[in-house]
Image (tube, rainbow, N blue to C red):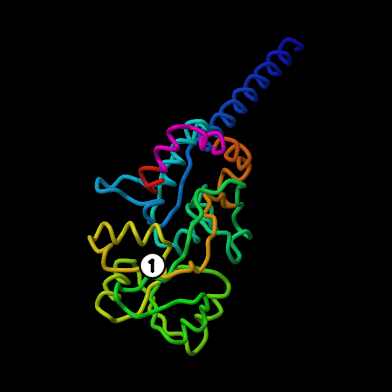
Amino acid sequence: MNLEKSVKKTLSSITLTTTLFFISSASLAKTNEVRVCSLQLPPQTMLNKQGEPDGFAVRILQGVSKQLDWKLTFIYSPWMRVVNHAKNGKCDLMMTVLNKGDYSEYMTFPKSYIINQKNVLVKAKGKKIQYSGDLEAFMRKHDIALYRDKRVDDKFEYYRKQPWAKLEEVNQIEQAIMMLLANRIDAYIENDLTSAYKLRELGLLDQVEVLSPPLNTTPAYITFPHAGNLVNQVDRYDNAIEAYKKTSEYKALEKHYLGN
C-alpha cells in the first residue's frame, strides 16, 4: 500500500512538473511572438514596394528585436483601428506614438523615443501666405487640410472645434497635397518627414514650401499597450534601444531614412 502511494505521489509530481514545463514553454513562445500595430507613416513606418514592413522606426525595432528575441508581426491599419487593437489586447507594441491626450491611460511610454517629430504647415510655392507662429490667427484666415485622425496638440484640438475653423479632413496625405496644388486649400498640416517623403515620391517636392516656425516638435515613441503581452518588458526594451543607438547600423539607418 505504501509502495502504491509512493508511486502515485511520484507520478503526480512528474505530471505537475511536465505541466508547468509546457505552461512555461507556451508562455515563452507567446512572449516571443510580438504583434506590432501601426498606421503607415513614412519614412518612420510603412510598406515598401514589395509589400514588406519598412521605415526608420521599423528597422530600429527589427534591430532591437534581435537582442530581445522577439519575433515581429506588423499589422497596418488606420489609426483609430490601431487604438482599438491596443485597447483590446490585439497588439503588443504601437508605433509611432506621440505622448498626447489620454494615451497613457492604456499604453506605457518608454524612456527612449524614436525620433523628434515636427508638425509643420505646408503651402504651395509662390503663394503669399505667411505664418507668424499665431496658429489661431492663421486658422481664422486660411483653409487647412490634415489627416483625419491626426492629433497636433491640445491648442490645435481646441481651435479645430471652433465654428470659424476651416478644416478639410483627408484619409491620406496624397489627398491633401493634391488639394493644395489645385488651390482648394491654403495649407496642410503634416510632420515634416512624412510630408517630404511623400512629396519626393510624387515628384512634387519643388512645388511646395514649409512655413516656419513648426507648430511643435514632439518625440515619437514605440509604446506598450497595457492589454498586450510586453508591458513588463519596457525596461529591457529601453536598455536594448539605447545600446542599439550607439551602433554603426543605427547611424546607417539615420543616413538612409533621414538624410543625417
Q: Is residue 141 left or right of residue 200?
A: right
Front in this rendered view, residue 128 or 216: 128
* Residue depicted at 50% across the width and 84% down the height: 137
> Looking at the rendering, in which quadrant would you find the N terminus?
top right
Residue, far bottom: 163
* Residue depicted at 32% across the width and 50% down the height: 47
Residue, far right: 2
Q: Where 71 falls versus 55 (above or below)?
A: above
Q: Main secondary structure of the magenta part?
A: helix
Residue matched to label 1: 210
Q: Position of residue 186 (x, y in %)?
A: 35, 79
Residue type at mark 1: give it: Val
Front in this rendered view, residue 87 or 37: 37
Q: Position of residue 151 (x, y in %)?
A: 50, 68
> Looking at the rendering, in which quadrant would you find the C terminus?
top left
For the record, the magenta segment spans 241-254
Look at the numbered disc 1 and give the secondary structure of its residue: strand
Q: Is residue 183 magenta?
A: no
Quarter of the figure with residue 219: bottom right
Q: Position of residue 127 (x, y in %)?
A: 31, 78
Q: Where 9 falls versus 73 (above or below)?
A: above
Front in this rendered view, residue 126 or 5: 126
* Residue depicted at 45% across the width and 35% down the height: 63
Residue, far left: 203
Front in this rendered view, residue 136 or 158: 136
Quarter of the figure with residue 232: top right
Q: Is residue 242 magenta?
A: yes
Mark 1 crowdedness (10 Å alpha carbons): few <14, some 14-19, many ≥20? some
Q: Position of residue 39 (x, y in %)?
A: 41, 57
Tally of numbered discs: 1
